[in-house]
Image (cartoon, grey):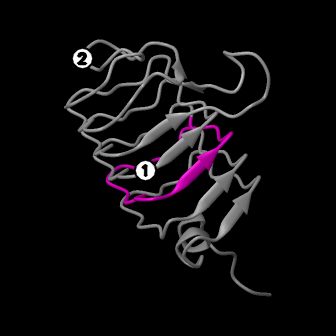
Amino acid sequence: MGRVMTARERLTSRRKYEALRGERFDGDDLTSVCLRELRFTRCSFRGADLRHATLDGCGFKLCDLRGADLSGASLRGVSFAGCDLTGADLRGADLTGARFGRVLTGTPPHGLTDLTGARLDHAVLRDLPLDQVVGRAEPGGVRPGAEGKG
C-alpha cells in the first residue's frame, strides 16, 4: 500500500494553471508553500497555516479561507472571487495587484468576497481596489470600499 501524500505534496505536485475543485486543506500546515498559479474553485482552506506562502497569480473562486493565516504571504496578482476570508490574517502580506471580486450568484451581498474581521495591518495594498467586498477589516487594516495604496 502506498504512502498518502500530504496536503503540501498534493499542492506542489500540480502543474502551472491546473484547476482544483472542491478540495479541502482545512487546518493544514502549508507554511512557505510555493504554488504555480493554480486555480481553486469551491476549495476550503479554513484555518490553514499559509504563513509566508507564495501564491502569486493564483485564482480563488467561492473558496472558504475563514481563519486562514496568510500573514507574510506573497499574494501578488491573486484573484479572490466570492470567497470568505472572515477572520483571515493577512498582516504583512503583499497584495499588490490582487483583486477582491464577486461572482454572479444573485443580489449582493451574495457572491461578494467577505473580509469581515480580516487583519490587514502592515499589508502591502498597492493597486488593490476594495469596492467588491463585504465586511469590515479589523482596526489597523483598511476598510472595504477604500482604495489601499499601502
Residue stretch rendered in magenta on the structure? 47-65
Amino acid type shown at disc 2:
Gly
Q: Residues within 10 Å of mark 2 (few under 14, many from 20)?
A: few
Q: Quadrant of the N terminus?
A: bottom right
Secondary structure under the numbered disc 2 in the rendered image = loop
Secondary structure under the numbered disc 1 in the rendered image = loop
**Residue extending furthest toward the bottom:** 1
- Marks 1 and 2 sit apart, C-alpha to C-alpha, by 21 Å
**Looking at the image, is 137 positioned above or below residue 16?**
above
Q: Quadrant of the C terminus?
A: top left
The reply to whether the magenta stretch includes residue 58 is: yes
- Which residue is more in the foreground, 114 or 100? 100
- Along the horizontal axis of the image, is 130 left or right of 96? right
**Looking at the image, is 24 positioned above or below residue 101?**
below
Q: Residues within 10 Å of mark 1 (few under 14, many from 20)?
A: many
Which residue is labeled 2 in the image? 140
Place of residue 139 in the rendered image (x, y in percent of width and height, measured from the top left): 29, 12
Which residue is labeled 1 in the image? 50
Q: Kindly tell me whether residue 48 is visible in this rendering.
A: no
- Along the horizontal axis of the image, is 69 left or right of 147? right
- Which residue is more in the foreground, 80 or 2? 80
Mark 1 or 2, nearer chain start: 1
Give the quarter of the image for residue 145.
top left
